[in-house]
Image: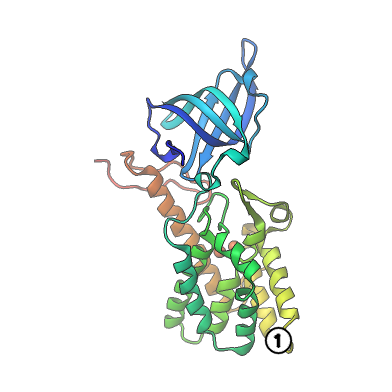
Amino acid sequence: MKSQYIDELKAGQSVKEIFVLAKKTVKDKKDGGFYAILEFSDRSGSIDGISWDGDSLGDVSAGDFVFITGNVTEYSGRLQVVVNSMSLVKESEVDASDFLPSYSGDVDEVLKELKVFRANVQDPNLRKLLDSFFDDNEFMILFRLAPAAKRVHHAYLGGLAVHTLSVLKLLKSIQSVYNSLNLDLLITAGILHDVGKIEEYTYKKSINISDRGRLLGHIVIGSDMVTERIRHIVGFPRDLKLKILHMILSHHGEKEWGSPKQPLFPEALVLHYADNLDSKMEMMRQISARHRGQNKQWSDYHPFLEREIYLGEES
Ligand SMILES: [Fe+2]
Ligand SMILES: [Fe+2]
């Protein structure tokens, strides 16, 4: 167990602790020599850092575990660590769970609720499709662990399951208003819409995008995974297959948000809005959590929401 976590660091404090070196950019000093702009992370978050002695940092690279000594200061409204020394720490010497953010609740409870949704699907072909994923232990281990993002929303172990469950709850409520929607189709596509994320990210030492994730993205990976499972279900109806695949491919809603197709029937439209709402609500939650106790009226500019968020009146 570490004794200092990033979200507990305060200006004026001295630091002697292991972190993941998330970023390292070495720059020239005007008067010769180098300085380094750094970022450190652990399971609680990330913090900027700076080292005025960039020459001494040659043996550590981004992604390494490092032991640092230094002091926390405030620089243009943000905390940063001014690093005095930094040395490489072997992977075998750290407890990985200290460095990867994970769901604060119980992921197994989330999976239990998800399985209730799955059990209520009546259509025999959709049931078979869901069973082929849920009865596959290897898949379930990854689905239980996977984050839903590297940074933007649900960027922690278990985040994919948490996000999927919220989307299912939204879909069920929306269907209670628009009764003509096919609930079995909504729930099946809701469960499967982001399954590609189990391969889009790597989540051993820190959360990162995998090569497949960079080159194909979770929408294509997920559509391939579902196509492959359907191939093994004899007599799976063509129309149902096209609908499920379309819902996965169109769930980001717009081409510029990564979907090759816009939603072309009601269930696809509803899945897109439920997914979009849950990811944006999570961004809003993170923004308020990050600014808690800072006595600020407006958040910093959020690059995904493309706006500053009102946090309430300063006290
Ligand atoms: Fe997605
Ligand atoms: Fe999603």
Tell me which residue sits at (43%, 45%) in the image.
308
Q: Is residue 270 visible?
A: yes
Q: In the current view of this chain or complex, which residue is farthest to the left? A: 315
Tell me which residue sits at (44%, 59%) in the image.
281
Mark 1, other Cα within 10 Å: few <14 / some 14–19 / many ≥20:
some
Q: Give the residue type at disc 1.
A: Phe
* Mark 1 element type: loop
Left or right side of 92 for 235: right
Quadrant holding ligand 2? bottom right
Examine the rendered structure and indicate whether residue 20 appears above or below residue 147.
Answer: above
The residue identified by callout 1 is 236
Q: In the current view of this chain or complex, which residue is farthest to the front? A: 93
Examine the rendered structure and indicate whether residue 277 appears above or below residue 294.
Answer: below
Number of marks in picture: 1
Q: Nearer the viewer, residue 255 or 192?
A: 192
Tell me which residue sits at (57%, 81%) in the image.
185
